[in-house]
Image: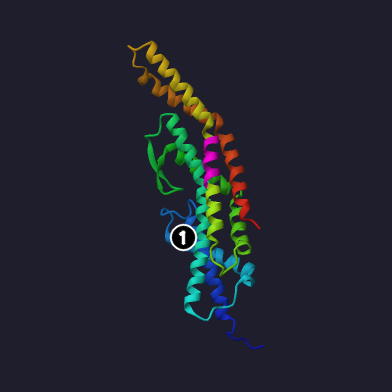
């Protein structure tokens, strides 16, 4: 049997497109795609994912184009698809960050800021805590398998070389953003009610006892009661969020 290099260009072309899409997706994912993760680690993850996906999806690729411009256009389309999927997942995770910001405002801890490692930006303590906890639970509950399945099924939903369906992705992004704000408000709803009742009570006490500095007495009580409420509701909040995460990823599964 004689081995030839006849299929090498087509193989290299297919692997290059898989690597472009997987690498772009990893760049957009929360936690893994942030600057806190060394670039070589992200590169190795993208390369490993491309090696795993190649034997599963290599038959879906069109023939090698004749021109360099067509190859560059195909790579750009794959990068756009990967970034769109990655940043959609980031928007899903950002729902818990918005909920954390609302909780921090209602419990008097909005001014305590630090760097959120899952988003790469300054955020409140509750936002950082809930975001890290959410990403940890995604891996602990094997929800990241849904991300891998979505990456594989993206080659069924979006054929290689076809480019990014911008209209459909814009609609999905808007729906994801709207659902994220809805879930964030629902997660923070008990704290919104708590804040309304607490500050209403503080206002009444201020009018009844104007000679007492109620504000300085209320702030420690607000923080303490807020932490107790977080302790009581944390498990329910995270179960609710994980259900939302799974439901938000499933539209990307074929």
Which residue extends farthest left? 211
Which residue extends farthest front? 167
Taking depth in this image into account, of 178 and 218 the one nearest to the observer is 178
Which region shows up in magenta? 177-186
Examine the rendering and report whether any part of residue 163 can be seen: yes
Where disc 1 sits, the SS reads helix
Q: Quadrant of the C terminus?
A: bottom right
Q: Quadrant of the N terminus?
A: bottom right
Q: Assess disc 1: are there few (<14), some (14-19) or many (≥20) residues with their C-alpha within 10 Å of its C-alpha.
A: few
Percent coordinates x, y for residue 200 in the rendering: 44, 20
Percent coordinates x, y for residue 128 in the rendering: 45, 41
Residue at x-position 51% and y-position 26%:
193
Examine the rendering and report whether any part of residue 133 can be seen: no
The residue tagged 1 is 41
Q: Residue 87 magenta-drawn?
A: no
Q: Is residue 131 left or right of residue 218?
A: right
């Amino acid at each position: 049997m004689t081995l030839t290099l006849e299929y090498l260009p087509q193989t290299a072309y297919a692997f290059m497109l898989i690597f472009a899409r997987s690498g772009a997706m990893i760049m957009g994912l929360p936690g893994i795609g942030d600057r806190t993760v060394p670039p070589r680690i992200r590169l190795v993850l993208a390369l490993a994912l491309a090696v795993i996906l190649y034997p599963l999806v290599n038959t879906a690729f069109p023939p090698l184009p004749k021109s360099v411009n067509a190859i560059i256009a195909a790579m750009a389309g794959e990068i756009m698809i990967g970034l769109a999927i990655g940043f959609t997942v980031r928007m899903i995770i950002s729902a818990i960050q918005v909920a954390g910001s609302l909780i921090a405002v209602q419990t008097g801890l909005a001014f305590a800021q630090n760097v959120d490692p899952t988003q790469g930006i300054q955020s409140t303590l509750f936002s950082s805590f809930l975001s890290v906890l959410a990403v940890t639970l995604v891996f602990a509950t094997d929800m990241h398998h849904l991300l891998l399945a979505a990456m594989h099924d993206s080659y069924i939903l979006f054929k290689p070389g076809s480019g990014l369906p911008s209209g459909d992705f814009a609609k999905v992004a808007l729906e994801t953003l709207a659902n994220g704000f809805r879930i964030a408000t629902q997660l923070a709803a008990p704290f919104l009610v708590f804040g309304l009742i607490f500050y209403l009570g503080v206002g009444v006490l201020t009018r009844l006892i104007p000679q007492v500095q109620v504000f300085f007495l209320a702030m420690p009580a607000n923080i303490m009661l807020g932490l107790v409420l977080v302790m009581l509701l944390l498990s329910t909040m995270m179960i609710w969020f994980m259900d939302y995460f799974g439901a938000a990823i499933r539209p990307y599964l074929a």
